[in-house]
Image (cartoon, rainbow, N blue to C red):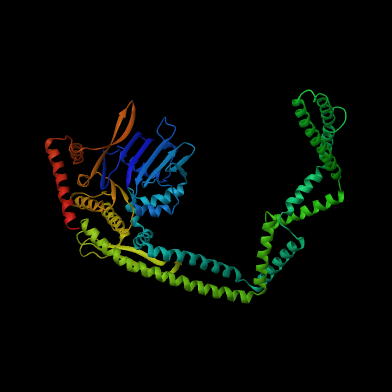
Amino acid sequence: MLVSLHVKNLALITETEVDFREGLNILSGETGAGKSIIIGSINLALGARADKDMIRTGADYALVELVFQLPSEILCDIKELEIPVEEDGVIIIQRKIQPSRNIFKICGETVTAKQIKALSERLIDIHGQHEHQSLLYKKNHMEILDSFAGDELVAVKDKLKEKYHRYTQIRKELAAFCIDDGAKAKELSLAVFEYHEIEEAGLSEGEDEELENSYRRMANSRQIVEAAARVHQLTGNGESAAADSVGHAVRDLRSVEGYDSRARELADELENIDALLNDFNRSIAEYIADMEFDEELFATTQERLNLLNHLKLKYGDSIAAVLKYQDTLAQKIEKLQNADAYKEKLEKSLAAAEKELNNLCQKASKIRSREAARLAADMVAALTDLNFLDVKFEIQVRQKEERTADGFDDVEFMISTNPGEPLKSLGSVSSGGELSRIMLAIKTVLASRDRIPTMIFDEIDTGISGKTAWKVSEKLGVLSRNHQIICITHLPQIAAMADSHYKIAKQAVANKTVTDITKLTENETVDELARMLGSDEITDTVRENAKELIQTAKIKKAQSLMTK
């Protein structure tokens, strides 16, 4: 579960830290107090897009830190990601937002945004304010069904993607091969010409680098010889030359070595230098002798380099690439010379790949059809709990002619929310309140099959009130038995169900607007519920109404436990 959130220098937040608890954590506050900033900061820590304008005015950076405490079964999954974890099962995620760059860390180690995303998918499920609108689009229905179907379908889809990729490759190759005889003859002629051009060059890997070094040396031989000659003159024998001077120095030290052992040691060292310098002079003399310019060799080297560069320009940026292209040409020539046999081979391969693909599509469809019936039944039960009085929910799994990497299924959620109404596509549901409840039902049903410990709902109560609000409240309470729930709400019925209640408030501090979050005491919770009830003035009567809401919530919790 999410143990704590620490935010610094983000938007209207100077610095705040909140400790979350198990069960249902409610966040409330006046409109515009900054509730979305709190959820947004969690999203930022988990890899959401960050803008430098999010950094609080006057600050150099913004910081968001999340601390999770995880059970052993979740830790086993996370170990596969090769992400650092504290010994006690604690994971600390930190993001530092700077004007020029962002830094992600997990337990103190710098990681990539991709690693953060992979980790977050196992830790937390965040329902944004407008996420329920995604239900209007049929393309999202298959994703929801596949999530419900679980690992069995995941394994089939992995194979399906692999086979689909193979199938499309063969189709493209066959389509490219189905050309007339004249075009094939032209292709064959060009391929043979290019192959022989490369073959006649007699290439060897690394040859170009060796030739370039030789060419560079020969092209600059005059400057090299002149420089080497000057060095030989300076370090050799002769007036003011190093070797002559060192030789004199050795003789001077030897003349006094009998008077002091240290002078003898220095003479020995200098004699070694004299020997090294003489060796160097012999080597540089040989180097100068070897640098005699051979015009014929230079011309041959230049011609060979021109040939290699020509081939690299046509067929690849290196000798290795050119040789690889030659291998490709050899395969192409063989195919074109045996066109009929190769086409027949491709057609057989395509038929086999299509059969494998169809089998996997059928297998995926069978799983989807089976799980669609189960998901629909679970959805009816969940929607009934959410005050849909006579709801019908059906998931249609139709087969299309077109095959994709996900199979050939077309999935659509169908619903009827009133007696006597025919089933209609979920995309035709226009009520925001109905969509919110349907999304909550989906989240509830999916939560029964996954192991994600924490769920966040940002105003799941959009468009609902009255008795329906109580139903949503009860559903969140039930969901919080096995998951940590963090929920932003404007409804007192939902807030009354809280195990922990936090208030988000905005105030002026030192001529600056600051947003902060505070865990409420029992009495403060009563006052906050009184405010949420819509009273201009919090009187004793309003407080009693708030207390009654809390008592009603306790009763409903107890009843739900009895019917579990």
Q: Residue at x 70, y 66 (%)?
A: 190
Considering only vertical position in the picture, is 452 above or below 337?
A: above
194 horizontally vs 166: left or right? right
273 horizontally vs 171: left or right? right
- Judge whether residue 404 can be spotted in this image: no
Residue 274's x, y, as percent? 81, 33
Q: How many labels does the image show?
A: 0
Quadrant assignment for the C terminus: bottom left
Considering only vertical position in the picture, is 379 above or below 545?
A: below
Residue 287's x, y, as percent? 83, 42
Most distant residue in the right direction: 238
Q: Quadrant of residue 9?
A: top left
Considering only vertical position in the picture, is 496 above or below 163?
A: above
The front one of 341 and 320 is 320
Considering only vertical position in the picture, is 555 above or below 169?
A: above
Residue 92's x, y, as percent? 39, 43
Q: Residue at x 38, y 40 (%)?
A: 65
